[in-house]
Image: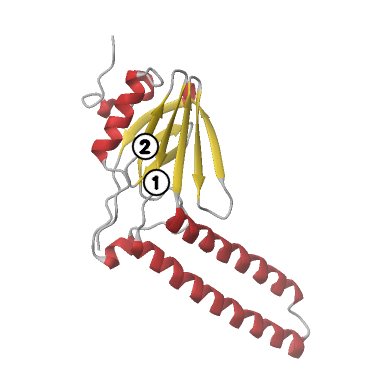
Amino acid sequence: MKDIKAKAILKMAENSGEIVFPGLRNWPRIVLLIVAIVIGLIAGLIGLKGMTRADIVFGYGDVFMCVWIFIWIVFILLLFRNLFWNIFNMEIVLIYNDYIEIERQGMLLKEVKKYAISDIENIRIREENYDLKWMNSMLNLDLFSPSAGSTIRFDIGNNTVKFGSGIDEAEAYAIIQKLVDLQYLSHKNIWKSNAQAVQFES
């Protein structure tokens, strides 16, 4: 089963731009998330039942039950969050003269992050090509990362930011080239290995 590649939609104005990534549906990942949710719900209910029985017999368990419930709820919410993201995901990147804004829609809560362009370094391209075999696709997944499968990435300090879910390397290079041509990005933002693919204006 082949992953459906998304195609970015670019809308460029004089002082701002918008790139919409409709998203990538990775069905092995979606199936794995559903299985993990079912197992998590069953394990959680069994654990609660066991702790309730221990509390009745031995007179303890209130603290452990509270901790277990908290961890269980957080775990299940993370799984549901990423399941919704994988089914309904969409990334919107807004570009201005001095900063970019990455908005992820399709999760339980909308995620919006801003980054100063002056702080962006090492913009680079890396296509995460999931194997068509189900097992390999599942093993290559990060269940808790909405940015898994992103093609464009850059560094902010010690952190790496990823976006551009579902596009291939050629399209990613074309997007970077467009941003350089419009002078939103400059050579200091680009990773040196991209120099042959991205030409800079003199």
Task: Note whether residue 149 is visible.
Answer: yes
Of marks 2 and 1, which one's residue comes earlier in the chain? 2
Tell me which corner region of the image, top left, top right, bottom left or bottom right, holds residue 52.
bottom right
- Residue tagged by mark 2? 9
For residue 152, what is the image quadrant?
top left
Which residue shows up at 27% across the image and 32% down it? 173
**Rendered location of residue 83, percent (x, y):** 47, 61
Q: Position of residue 150 (x, y in %)?
A: 37, 45
Quarter of the figure with the C terminus: top left
Lateral position of residue 172 relative to residue 70, left or right: left
Q: CA distance from mark 2 to mark 1?
A: 8 Å
177 left or right, relative to 56: left
Tell me the amino acid under the disc marked 1: Pro
Q: Is residue 138 above or below residue 103?
A: below
Circles 2 and 1: CB atoms closer than 8 Å: yes
Q: Is residue 191 visible?
A: no
Q: Give the farthest residue toward the right.
A: 59
Write down the residue under mark 1. Answer: 22
At x 59%, y 76%, the residue is 44
Name the residue at the bottom extreme.
Answer: 57
